[in-house]
Image (cartoon, rainbow, N blue to C red):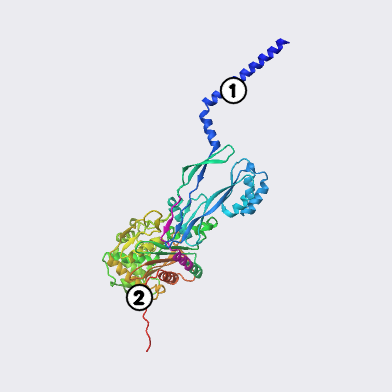
Amino acid sequence: MSRLVNRRIRLLLAVLVLAFAVLLLRAAWLQGVRAQSLSRLGQTQHREQVALPASRGTIFDRTGVRLALGEQATTVYADPMQIRNPRRVAAIVGQTLGIDPRAAYASLADRTRGFVYLARQVDAAQAAGLAHRKIPGLGFLPEERRSYPQGTVGAQVLGYVGVDDKGLAGLEVQYDHDLAGAAGHQTLVKDPSGHVIDVLDDRPERQGRDVTLTLDHTIQANAEEILRETVAKWNAKSATAIVLDPRTGAVLAMAVEPGYDANRYPSAPRDLQRDRAVTDTYEPGSTFKVVTVAAALSERLVSPSTEFTLPYSIHVADRVIHDAEPRGTIRFSVAQILAHSSNVGAITLAELLGRDRLASWISRFGFGHSTGIDFPGESPGIVLPAAKWSGSTIGNVPIGQGIAVTPVQMAAAYAAIANRGVWSRPHLLDHVEGGGRPSLRHRRIMSPGVASQLMMMLKDVVAEGTGTYAAIPGYQVAGKTGTAQKPDAQGGYANGQYVASFVGTVPASRPRLVVLVAVDEPRGAIFGGVVAAPAFQQIASFDLRYLEIAPDAPTISTTTP
């Protein structure tokens, strides 16, 4: 019996020694081999890194009105593994946040995931109401949501921001680097119960910088309203307007109709979100004749008073081109060719210039090249190289056919004439917070004398030519009408589809504004002088009053004795 007891004691002792040896080896292994990794694991259990989102900068117009800003919002997320009744929680979330409960249920019922978004950047008050219910498994993350207080005003110019606070279109993406700032992060040190006992600032966030534009929200809103009325009156497909300061190239308005509310960009058709003033091209028609006339004057082939005998039509290679209105043979000066928008006269001047010189002047005016405006997606237009001109090209390009330009290119070209022959790069940025104003880019494209001659001729267009509906009482107006048939997919021209346009400057004696209006596919009338010139007159008249620009041709009242 005693032997059995001793054997059991020895066995128990052996087991204890063996267990102690195993524990000793385990401790040695943990302290020697796993010490570093376990230390890191312990730290992570007591430390938590938290991202510090940066607020996005505000976009202001030139007067300090906010066009885009950040608003307080909340993102709601969940841990499906902690949700006891997914269907009930989904119903509560859907009712409180105004989202589809079926989509919420699909996320909450997925127990394979430990984190799901239920709603991004929802109204902070609604999220607070949901948080008040204290539903286990739901989490709330404060975020910022982009808001556009002016709604539709300047929507295509401003663009929009995605839920990740990154610019996706327009100036929001153009100046995303300045607006976005940089997120920071900090480390929270917690006790074993999960309570925060210390906060370590690893990297503070850098807030986004504010951006101030050259746009004026009042001028922009008025231009959009007049375009809406013009589109409705003529049952047009769309319309575009640009208001430009010819001295600096500052864009005061860049309007496109139909438009959309920037706050509802996900539901807006993609076609409405495009800023056609920069991205789309059109055949300019007779507004392009000023380039042909400028080239002939600059090359000293003619003067404004040089006269030509012009038949009703002219034969160019395999084409016969005639003026818009039937007439007999007439004798027109160069000034009258421009004032009455004679196709035959413009082609006659182009034939004096020849292919190479005309092509050189087209390039000099900036057509076929991007203006460099600070806006994404700018088109350089479509200009056929001189080497690829056919025999009939000299008959269509001088009158604005067979060439495609953007509205901003055309506005900049007329601004150069108004600015005594100096072209200024169009721009939308005035300055970024904490930085200076961007350098303005200028280049001379014609002499002051030729620019002055062109201004006199363009005043005749409004005084007695095709642009009489653009006249503004008390002001001298210089401008040009354009009516261009739209090309079709087969390489010809679409029947009954036109772009009617007018480009002008006021006051003509000391230009302060260049205004372009282009109306796509008007119905009932097609001519720029009838469709677009009145819209120019309304936009320019409003802007002159708003900016308090003094008249340069005051009307004289007379009294009868």
Give x and y (percent) for residue 503. Answer: 39, 67
Of the numbered discs 1 and 2, the one sitting upstream in the chain is 1
C-alpha span from label 1 to label 2: 104 Å
Residue 463 at least partly seen:
yes
Image height of 524 relative to 381, above or below: below
Residue 498 at least partly seen:
no
Marks 1 and 2 in Cβ contact (< 8 Å): no
Question: 62 left or right of 103?
Answer: left
Q: Nearer the viewer, residue 134 or 287?
A: 134
Asked if residue 221 is among those painted magenta in the image, a careful observer would answer: yes
Which mark, by number, is residue 553? 2
Three-letter amino acid code at the position of disc 1:
Leu
Q: Residue tagged by mark 1?
A: 23
Three-letter amino acid code at the position of disc 2:
Ala
Asked if residue 34 is among those painted magenta in the image, a careful observer would answer: no
Using a 10 Å C-alpha cutoff, classify the residue at mark 2 as few (fewer than 14 neighbours), some (14 to 19) or many (20 or more).
some
Question: 471 left or right of 453?
Answer: right
Residue at left offset 60%, top offset 52%: 128
Give x and y (percent) for residue 119. Answer: 58, 50
User: Element type at marker 1?
Assistant: helix
- Magenta region, residue range: 207-226
Q: Nearer the viewer, residue 478 or 344?
A: 478
User: Element type at marker 2?
Assistant: loop
Front disc: 1 or 2 = 1
